[in-house]
Image (cartoon, grey):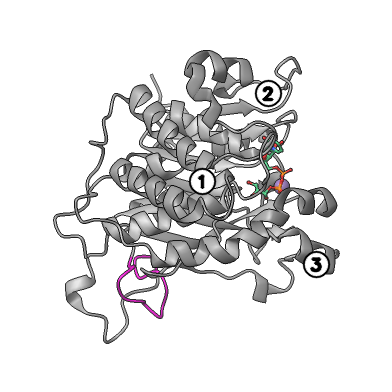
Amino acid sequence: MAPTTQSLLPKRPPPLLKDELDIVIPTIRNLDFLEMWRPYFEPYHLIIIQDGDPSKTIRVLQGFDYEFYNRNDINRILGPKASCISYKDGACRSFGFLISKKKYIFTIDHDCFVAKDPTGTEINALEQHIENLLKPSTPFYFNTLYDPYRKGADFVRGYPFSLREGTPTAISHGLWLNIPHYDAPTQLAKPRERNTRQATTLYVDAVMTVPKGALFPMCGMNLAFDRELIGPAMYYGLMGEGQPIGRYDDMWPGWCIKVICDHLGWGVKTGLPYIWHSKASNPFSNLTKEYKGILWQEDMIPFFQSLKLPKDCNTSQKCYIELSKLVRARLGKIDPYFIRLADAMVTWIEAWDELNNTSGTASTAPAKVK
Ligand SMILES: O=c1ccn([C@@H]2O[C@H](COP(=O)(O)OP(=O)(O)O[C@H]3OC[C@H](O)[C@H](O)[C@H]3O)[C@@H](O)[C@H]2O)c(=O)[nH]1
Ligand SMILES: [Mn+2]
């Protein structure tokens, strides 16, 4: 039988990590935004976390393979441990990280769309995150040509060959066009500011490793990570209803994972890919949620900067439990909230180990912790 034209076409390679990556989406709205992502997300499995009133129906488009959880499901699955999963805050996405069985996670907000680069080409954010995660990081010595493993780049003169193998990448932190990830005071001061691709200075074509010893403000809306390495530390904390703080759901794990990655010798990358962040949330309601975070971060950040984890903490779980003790001892003085947060961190690890049949034995650090 004559070959059909279809069979003559070069076979498209299967999407990278198709069966090793879950896409976690927290939402209080219908997920129509998925239509724009269909070419990139359809081959992957989605984990959708409905926040807020579980009796409300959330529409998910046809053709996607997904599992769906609302608050009733979270309470049913976790029982009393559900107390560590936030309610009425994007932090509820932590449950998706917990319930997944895959090695990698990509998490995205419902108001993040496909962006275009300065040439007008659509950005496949998921593919770029996967590339970031599968290639090593360089936390111990800064490469001035940024990510040396990207096409068209390399290590510059003076970069020690003993470090050119790099280290495993735990986090890939993407950025945003249009609505930048500003706190409420900045949003109020610059209501019309947009990170526009026309001003190409704001589209920075770079991926870089956040150097060891440097903290960074991690944004949770366009983020991927190696769940086997750093999943136990990717807890978005106690936020939203019943809590004195909100919208620090990503800042908290950002600080926790960075001190743990530094300790265990893993890398955190930031930069490409960009997504198009379509909607600015209300700065006034944001201010009521995040003002304590703005105040407390002046103490939280020096706390994380001063941390030294014991050498025998050689897994993310062990580091995280040690961290919870330090949070209780040193941040508990600021506000009783941190005592509850320290308890919730322990509950989170208990839930993690229960649902993943681990007991702090997950991926250990490389032989020598630098
Ligand atoms: O009560 C809620 C509110 C929102 N969500 C879901 O979380 C995602 C983020 O919500 P939204 O886009 O409205 O807020 P942003 O201000 O843009 O959020 C970013 O900045 C604050 C936090 O750091 C947050 O993590 C960032 O994403 C979106 O998918 C909503 O559907 C929710 O689940 N519950
Ligand atoms: Mn948003």
User: Residue 33 occupies which quadrant of the picture?
Assistant: top right
Q: Residue 364, relative to residue 201: is it above or below?
A: above
Task: Tell me the magenta residue range.
Answer: 138-151
> What is the secondary structure assignment of the residue under circle 2?
loop
Q: Is residue 147 covered in magenta?
A: yes
Q: CA distance from mark 3 to mark 1?
A: 26 Å
Label 3–label 1 contact, CB within 8 A: no
Residue type at mark 3: give it.
Glu
> Magenta-highlighted stretch: main secondary structure?
loop
| Residue under the point 74% across and 21% down | 53
| Residue under the point 26% across and 64% down | 166
* Residue 85 % position (x, y): 55, 31
Residue type at mark 2: give it.
Val
Q: CA distance from mark 2 to mark 1?
A: 19 Å
* Crowd tier of the residue under label 1, counting other residues whose Cα lies within 10 Å: few below 14, some 14–19, many 20 or above: many
Q: In the rendering, which numbered label is found on residue 298?
A: none
The residue pinned by badge 2 equals 60
* Residue 343 % position (x, y): 46, 37
> What is the secondary structure assignment of the residue under circle 1?
helix
* Residue 100 % position (x, y): 43, 28
The residue pinned by badge 3 equals 193
Q: Is residue 181 covered in magenta?
A: no
Residue 332 seen from this side: yes
User: Residue 307 occupies which quadrant of the picture?
Assistant: bottom left
| Residue under the point 74% across and 70% down | 198
The residue pinned by badge 1 equals 126
| Residue under the point 70% across and 52% down | 290
Label 2–label 3 contact, CB within 8 A: no
